[in-house]
Amino acid sequence: MWAAVLGTALGCYLLKLAGLSVPPRVLEHRIVARVADLIPVALLAALVAVQTFSRGHQIVVDARAVGLAAAVVLLTLRAPFLVVVFGAALVAAGVRLL
């Protein structure tokens, strides 16, 4: 078990070191900068989709999907972040109680 933890830590360190050793001219390229800006958004969207529409190995549509829809509506209305989070949670909880 500890060998796996230490191996993973070493791998993460080497990956970080490889990223730091990339020449600046490569990082300043327009396409690389655009891709680097979009990767976190894509990963977060994938995480939200998996957490919203799955339970174990099954695809489900339940109160979490309604809460996500409420969050999208609140974001479209430009509500503050805390209002979006609490509003989505309240809507999802209300649907779950029904």
Image: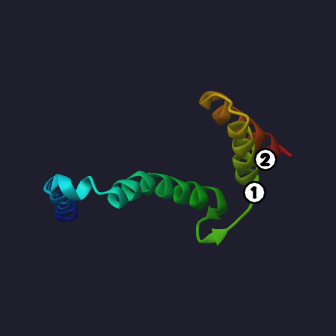
Element type at marker 1? Answer: loop
Mark 2 Cα-neighbour bin, 10 Å: few <14, some 14–19, many ≥20 = few
Residue 31 in the image: above or below residue 97: below
As drawn, is 64 to the left or to the right of 36? right
Query: Vertically, is 59 above or below 39?
Result: below
Task: State the colouring used for the structure image.
Answer: rainbow
Describe residue 33's horizontal placement relative to residue 67 as left or right.
left
84 vs 54, nearest the viewer: 84
Amino acid carrying mark 2 in the image? Arg
Q: Are marks 1 and 2 in contact (CB under 8 Å)?
A: yes
Return the x and y of residue 50 as percentages of the image width and height: 58, 61
| Secondary structure of the residue carrying numbered label 2 | helix
Percent coordinates x, y for residue 81 in the rendering: 60, 31
Residue assigned mark 2: 96
Does the image show residue 51?
yes
Look at 66% across and 61% down and name the residue there: 53
Asked whether, in this view, residue 1 is left or right of residue 64, the answer is: left
The three-letter amino acid code for the residue at tag 1 is Asp
Q: Which residue is mark 1?
A: 62
Quadrant of residue 34 within the rendered picture: bottom left
Expressed as whole percent of the image width and height from the top left, the position of residue 49 reads: 60, 59
Residue at 35% from the left image edge and 54% from the top image edge: 33
* Disc number placed over residue 79 in the picture, else none: none
The N terminus lies in quadrant: bottom left
Disc 1 to disc 2, C-alpha distance: 8 Å
